[in-house]
């Protein structure tokens, strides 16, 4: 029997009950659309995070307190760990310990509300080195000058603020030289950043940067760091520098051979690998859960096809009476089931891509993130192929049942 004739018979059967065909197709389309949209949103999230990580530069190593996080408790330990102190930074700075090091910037994070006059705001307050950060991210003030090692040694009460912090506290008034207060301590505004937005993991518009020594002495009351950033002379020396830092800190912390590090070293490459594996696993998990909807759609196809076989019993008997074989009947009904799933899959891929694109636009507009729409071609092809398999598997039983009907009994069927 010609393929074109089989397709014509299958499409005729589908057109005979358009509402039933549409509802069956819709069940498959929804499942495929969910898989495609989840995969697309996951790809967009991964691209966004990778762009943020790449903004750190290829020549930096982040050193954090606590062992490599393996769960929520370890992440808490990293945030509140106290295993990195000034003596660690001094040891890492020595050329004989870390020959390829260019500079180091300790970081401390300061929670709290900033106020000026009657205005208050909650910025991202960080203790660090403004000169180091400006060079690292190529971000320089629109007004004023960056503070550096001199202010850090003197524990100066100076601050660099982002454009949004300036607007919230000062409005259109001049902020340079004014004093803002955090935790009862006044800081003189010595530089104001232009509107910059998100760079790496920091939103510079909402940042308030002060000397880390000042933050430790007057605001936090401790001498440890939440993190320190190491710049390397050449990206190709990242790995050897990482090993040098690890050896230096292990010796400083008196760790025995085989004992786990009480600190964590991160590079942009390692962060990308870790984040990529987490997001991929999460996307696959969600897509697998949603794929259950396709199985439900498959059961619906089988039920609809069984009803269709019962309604078309006389048609089957007549076709057999004029010479159609069991294989012809089986192929007709199986083709009909596969066509429904293929059409449903195609609609689902289009719908899922549209949902993901609309979501990416909404995230860019309302969340202000540089979110990219990435069509997940492998996921779309997989979902489409899976829908075809669903049609074959769940259409086989009704098709076999139709093909095995006796012509005499089928013609007498009421």
Image (cartoon, rainbow, N blue to C red):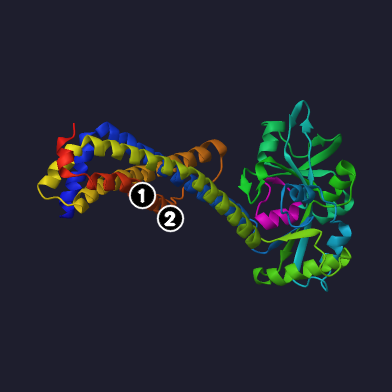
Say which of marks 2 and 1 sits in front: 1
* Residue identifier under label 2: 378
Residue 23 in picture, x, y percent from top left: 33, 34
Q: Mark 1 highlights which residue?
A: 393
| Left or right side of 33 for 93 | right
Q: Nearer the viewer, residue 316 or 367?
A: 316
* Dot 1 crowding, Cα within 10 Å, few <14, some 14–19, many 20+: some
Residue 171 lies, in percent from the top left, at: 68, 31
Residue drawn 88% across the image and 65% down it:
252
Apparent side of residue 339 relative to residue 300 in the rendered image (left or right): left
Task: Please report whichever mark, 2 or 1, sits nearer to the chain's N-terminal start.
Answer: 2
The answer to whether 404 is drawn above or below residue 60 in the figure is above
Query: In which image quadrant can residue 304 be found?
Result: top left
Q: Nearer the viewer, residue 320 or 173?
A: 320
Q: Is residue 60 magenta?
A: no
- Does residue 254 appear in this view? yes
Residue range of the region highlighted in magenta in the rendering: 130-145
- Residue in view at x 71 percent, y 35 percent: 174
The single residue placed furthest to the top in the displayed view is: 118
């Amino acid at each position: 029997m010609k393929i074109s004739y089989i397709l014509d018979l299958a499409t005729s059967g589908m057109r005979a009950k358009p509402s039933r065909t549409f509802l069956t197709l819709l069940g498959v389309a929804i499942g495929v659309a969910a898989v495609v949209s989840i995969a697309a949103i996951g790809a967009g999230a991964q691209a966004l995070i990778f762009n943020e990580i790449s903004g750190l530069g290829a020549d930096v190593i982040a050193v954090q307190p606590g062992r490599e996080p393996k769960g929520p408790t370890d992440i808490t330990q990293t945030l509140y760990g106290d295993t990195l102190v000034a003596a660690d930074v001094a040891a890492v700075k020595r050329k004989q310990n870390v020959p390829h090091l260019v500079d180091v910037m300790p970081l401390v994070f300061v929670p709290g509300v900033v106020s000026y006059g009657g205005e208050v705001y909650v910025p991202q307050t960080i203790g660090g080195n403004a000169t180091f950060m400006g060079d690292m991210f190529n971000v320089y003030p629109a007004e004023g000058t960056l503070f550096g090692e001199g202010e850090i040694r003197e524990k100066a009460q100076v601050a660099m603020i982002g454009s949004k912090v300036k607007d919230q506290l000062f409005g259109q008034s001049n902020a340079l030289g004014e004093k803002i207060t955090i935790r009862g301590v006044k800081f003189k505004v010595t530089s104001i950043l232009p509107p910059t937005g998100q760079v790496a993991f920091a939103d510079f518009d909402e940042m308030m940067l002060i000397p880390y020594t000042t933050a430790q002495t007057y605001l936090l009351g401790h001498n440890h760091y939440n993190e320190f950033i190491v710049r390397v002379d050449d990206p190709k020396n990242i790995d050897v520098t990482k090993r040098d830092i690890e050896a230096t800190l292990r010796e400083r912390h008196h760790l025995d051979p085989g004992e786990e590090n009480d600190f964590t070293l991160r590079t942009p490459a390692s962060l990308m690998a870790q984040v990529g594996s987490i997001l991929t696993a999460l996307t696959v998990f969600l897509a697998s859960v949603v794929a259950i909807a396709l199985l439900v759609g498959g059961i619906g196809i089988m039920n609809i096809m069984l009803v269709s076989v019962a309604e078309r019993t006389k048609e089957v008997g007549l076709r057999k009476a004029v010479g159609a074989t069991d294989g012809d009947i089986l192929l007709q009904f199986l083709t009909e089931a596969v066509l429904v799933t293929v059409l449903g899959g195609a609609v689902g891929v289009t719908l899922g891509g549209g949902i993901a694109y609309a979501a990416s636009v909404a995230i860019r507009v309302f969340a202000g993130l540089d979110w990219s729409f990435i069509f997940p071609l492998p996921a779309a092809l997989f979902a489409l192929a899976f829908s075809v398999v669903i049609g074959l598997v769940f259409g086989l039983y009704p098709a076999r049942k139709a093909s095995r009907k006796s012509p005499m009994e089928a013609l007498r069927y009421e």
